[in-house]
Image (tube, rainbow, N blue to C red):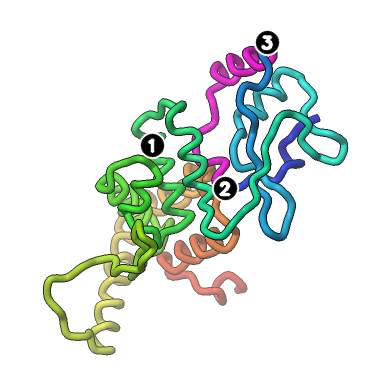
Amino acid sequence: MRWRGRIPTLTAARLFPALSPDELRELSADIAQHGLRSPVTLLKPVDGSPQLLDGRNRLDAVELAGLPMVDADGNLIIEHVVIEETSGFDPFAFVVSANLHRRHLTREQKREVIATLLCDQPSRSDHATAQIAKADHHTVASVRSELEGRWEIPHVAERVDTRGRSQPATKSTRSSAPVSANEAERLRRQAVLGFTTVLHEQAPQTLEVLVKLPGNERRQIVTLPLEKRVALARGYLRALGVAPDDLQA
């Protein structure tokens, strides 16, 4: 009996990339011969049923080996542990701690891990995200810039540091006078004009990129909560100058 669709999976469980077909077959053969060496981990929310936190590839390998794993009610019958969720528990930090030492990631795979962390919590500072991902904070800043440039995460005014404190996202060495309403509107119109100019001058290329982006990033986007996916879609529509009334027309 297949486990997918029967066992709810947390976004954190998809933090690391899936094994390649060859790696999955190798793991499946090892499990068939020696059994499951490391139990999978479920997280039980305060109110709710347990969800898969760690062990997605192991479940796929057990399934490939043809071993019984899920009963008729959708409950795991292979070796597993259940963690009771407590205040302050970070599922992403748990998954990184449990997997990073045994996974050899490429540069791009590491950046995908960082991107998932930022999409889950854009307000987490670069240093705090780097601490979880075991990466350099400059790399985190680079990934953040790419995601913000593609409107996949918002620009946040404040970020939560490694000690849980909210800090300004950017620090200025001098104070600046507040921008007047007229100036803010002028800057907004200037930005819109600049975007639409590029869009009209390079319409085929630009539209093609915008259309392909959700497809190319689908594996990343589908892991986001619904409200974040809605916000992302609205961001594309705003950038294209499409209003809700236009969609209803």
Kindly report the distance in space between the C-alpha atoms of the residues bearing marks 3 and 2: 30 Å
| x and y percentages locating residue 242 in the rendered image | 48, 70
Quarter of the N terminus within the rendering: top right
Residue pictured at 40% horizontal, 46% vertical: 132
> Is any part of residue 155 visible from this angle?
no
- The extreme bottom residue here reads 181
Could you say which disc has been placed on residue 33 in the image? Answer: 3
Could you say which disc has been placed on residue 64 in the image? Answer: none
Asked if residue 37 lies in the magenta stretch, the reply is: no
Residue pictured at 32% horizontal, 71% vertical: 192
Considering the numbered disc 1 on the image, is that residue within a helix, a strand or a loop? helix
The three-letter code of the residue at mark 2 reads Thr
Residue carrying label 1: 110
Considering the numbered disc 3 on the image, is that residue within a helix, a strand or a loop? helix
The three-letter code of the residue at mark 3 reads Gln
Describe residue 77's horizontal placement relative to residue 16 as left or right.
Answer: right
Query: What predominant SS class does the magenta segment belong to?
Result: helix
Mark 3 against mark 1, which lies toward the viewer?
3
Residue pictured at 35% horizontal, 56% vertical: 162
Q: 122 above or below 17? A: below
Q: Which residues are magenta?
A: 12-33
Considering the numbered disc 2 on the image, is that residue within a helix, a strand or a loop? helix
